[in-house]
Image: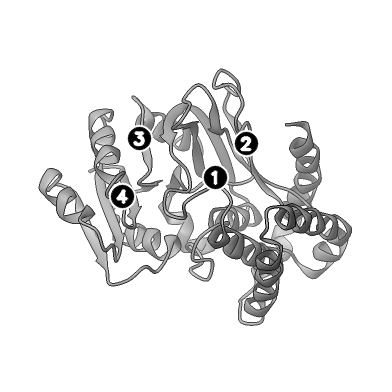
Amino acid sequence: MREVTVVIPNYNGAKYLLPCLQALYGHTRTGMDVIVVDNGSKDNTIRDAKAAFPQVKYILLDENYGFCRAVNEGIWAADTEYVILLNNDTEILDGFVEHLLRAIRRSPRIFSVEARMLRYDDPDKLDSAGTYYNAMGWAFARGRDASAEKYTRPARTFAACGGAAIYRKAVFEEIGYFDERHFAYLEDIDVGYRARIYGYVNLYEPGARVIHVGSASSGSRYNEFKTRYSGRNNIYLIYKNMPLPQILLNLPFLAAGFFIKGCFFLKKGMGKSYLLSLREGFRICRKCDRVPVRRSHLLNYLVIQAELWINIIRRFAL
């Protein structure tokens, strides 16, 4: 029986999906299932992919429900112990799947393992060597734009970037799946945060390498779409995962973090969009279910809080 299913969400990815699948099959020696979940694409992506890769399972949604719904559909359909989420704008390198499998097999307490992500436009530079979150409300990729020769050792991270990572499927049943209220952005931080609350760990595995275009669906690193959803989802992420005493403890750091981000987006000409995104974040908090606070998770909250503070130093030390 196969151990792993690779789930690839797709939306109008005619430029990317075929090279992604070609690299996946060309650089993987382990048996695997592959599921492509299409978010109502209007181009010929799926027609072309079916012709070239009939062995892939295709799940076709009737409209664009966002990243979270797409990957959830793939995870639900997977009949394996592990699931790899892989963006369509990636091309894996040799041994990618095998390295992720070896890393996650090391302990049943490992929820996710993130791959080593290299920039598509310059593979000699890193796109991400681990995903972190800090007490200022900032999510960031360790090593972004640094030399690809750095960060060559496995490490614990706060969460795993959902663009190229392996997950233990059974843990989703315990902590919940990707929150579809996010639609896109910070959903991987949210699910990784929940896993940490429940006592699981997330890792970075440098041997699993993938070339990543980045922002292929939204258009660029900074744009109105990303600003809208990342700002909104950050408010939601904090409210959902932090108990009230923890929010109050971090409030000075969070206020500083959101102020700095506001100034940044103001300079980018997107200040109004950012403010509106925060207002929308408070609105969706009224409808959300918070992660239940349990006495058995108290030590996990303390460890997380220490890491949130340490990650402020990490962010400015990069």
Instruction: State whether residue 160 is above or below residue 286.
Output: above
Q: Compare marks 2 and 3 and give the one earlier in the sequence.
A: 3
Instruction: Identify the residue position indicated by label 1 in the image.
Output: 160
In whole angstroms, how far apart are the C-alphas of marks 2 and 3?
24 Å
Q: Secondary structure at mark 3?
A: strand
Q: Secondary structure at mark 4?
A: loop
Quadrant of image for the C terminus:
top right
Which residue: 62% across, 65% down?
Answer: 233
User: Residue at 30% across / 55% down in the picture?
Assistant: 78
Amino acid type at image mark 1: Ala
Determine the image quadrant of residue 209.
top left
Q: Is residue 53 visible in this depiction of the protein? A: yes
Q: Position of residue 229 (x, y in %)?
A: 57, 64
For discs 1 and 4, the disc positioned in front in the rendered view: 1
In this view, the mark in front (3 or 1) = 3
Q: Residues within 10 Å of mark 4 (few under 14, many from 20)?
A: some
In the rendered structure, are the residues bearing label 4 and label 3 in contact, judged by CB atoms less than 8 Å apart? no
Residue beneath label 3, please?
91
Q: Mark 1 Cα within 10 Å, few/some/many (few <14, many 20+)?
A: many
| Three-letter amino acid code of the residue under disc 4 | Thr
Secondary structure under badge 2? Answer: strand
| Amino acid type, mark 2 | Arg
Most extreme residue toward the top, as rendered?
A: 149
Q: CA distance from mark 3 to mark 1?
A: 18 Å
The residue that disc 2 covers is 156
Q: Position of residue 99 (x, y in %)?
A: 41, 29
- Residue 24, relative to residue 189: is it above or below? above
Q: Nearer the viewer, mark 4 or mark 3?
A: 3
Residue 168 horizontal side relative to residue 138, left or right: left
Disc 4 marks which residue?
Answer: 80
* Number of other residues with Cα within 10 Å of mark 2, as a class: few under 14, some 14 to 19, many 20 or more: some
Residue type, label 3: Glu
